[in-house]
Amino acid sequence: MSTSIQNMTEMNTADAAGLQERIARFHKAKEAIVAQVRRIIVGQDEVIDQVMVALFVGGHCLITGLPGTAKTLLVRTLSQALGLEFRRIQFTPDLMPSDITGTDIIEEDSSTGRRTWTFVPGPIFANVLLADEINRTPPKTQSALLEAMQERSCTVRGNIYTIKAPFFVLATQNPIELEGTYPLPEAQLDRFIFNVLLDYLSAEQEMKVLDLTTTTHHAQVEAVTNAEDIIDFQQIVRMVPISDSIARYAVDLVRATRPTDPTAPDFVKKYVNFGGSVRAAQFLALSAKARALMNHRYHVMTEDIASLMRPILRHRILLNFQAESDHLTQDDILKRILEAVPAPK
């Protein structure tokens, strides 16, 4: 047994052997999930890795991409491979909060004539919830997700209903079609661990897509895990150690995005109105643990922090008019921050 695994816990020998078995099961399940997803999804390696990191840490994911980039197909395929209960909500301008959370109805007992309130659960009571085109519904309806995303519960008529674990919201949005859309509130954006960007495929990958989708070939996705496995994997990820220097590096990167922080570079003070919150640092450290374990390492490295910084922070910093006039994006600013903040030796 490696010293790295021993460092994950101070258990006795028997417990350490059990932990090693759980880690082996984690790696086997991760490879099996990727293999199943690859039956349907072509390319998008980085996107798949980031979404799986979100699943292994129990976070929610915002997927931004142009029409036809397989956003919805990716989420549905992942839920099938994970063996979890899947629900989909198509967000529209007339969608109501009760269409998401569920509602109480009055039922009458035919024998006694007595009427009682009965709660009818909405689609939010699932393991994987696809919020398709989430920015097409008004803020009132979008806010129905806030409690569920943070507290894993929802309140209807004063009654609190718990959503069973694991629970993931995977939301999609179109970045170019702005007519009839409503920007997501900052508080809701902060609940998403990642803002994942889907791009066009290469020519070779598009040829493979044609081969998979324009013939009689029909791939089937098999479930390779279940809810109990995912919950156990989330616990294993939290046991991965992170050194004080690496944790401080994550904190320094997040603090550098805040224009009011003394350590912020001058270009941040010039172009940024608001930076990342403490939640961003928490997600950065936790996601780095998952990435390390997925890459068969039992400690976090600076490359884990650096590779996950942009998808975790790009939706958490608000640029000002000066940045817009200079044609700068959040990713441009974050890249410069990554170059400006020294990594630990």
Image (cartoon, grey):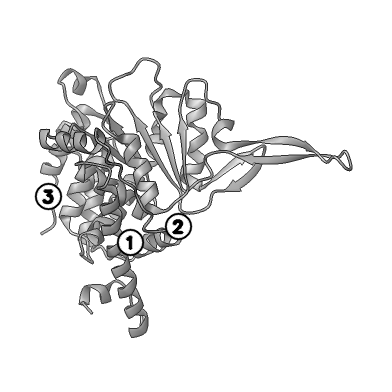
Instruction: Give the number of the mark in front: 1 or 3.
Output: 1
Q: Nearer the viewer, residue 202 or 260?
A: 202
Please report the residue visible at 18 percent of the width from the left and 31 percent of the height from the top. 200
Looking at the image, tell me whether mark 2 or mark 3 is earlier in sequence order.
Answer: 2
Provide residue 230's location: percent of width, then percent of height.
Answer: 40, 58
Residue 70 quadrant:
top left
What's the CA distance linking mark 1 and mark 2?
Answer: 16 Å
Please report the residue visible at 20 percent of the width from the left and 54 percent of the height from the top. 304
Q: Is residue 37 above or below residue 261?
A: below
Residue named by callout 1: 237
Please report the residue visible at 43 percent of the width from the left and 58 percent of the height from the top. 226
Q: Is residue 193 visible?
A: no
Residue named by callout 3: 342
* Number of marks drawn: 3
Q: Which mark is residue 227?
A: 2
Provide residue 244's location: percent of width, then percent of height.
Answer: 24, 62
Q: Amino acid at mark 3?
A: Pro
Looking at the image, tell me whether mark 1 or mark 3 is earlier in sequence order.
Answer: 1
Provide residue 136's location: percent of width, then percent of height.
Answer: 42, 23
Q: Which mark is residue 64?
A: none
Q: Amino acid at mark 2?
A: Ala
What's the CA distance linking mark 1 and mark 3?
Answer: 26 Å
Left or right, 3 with reference to 226:
left
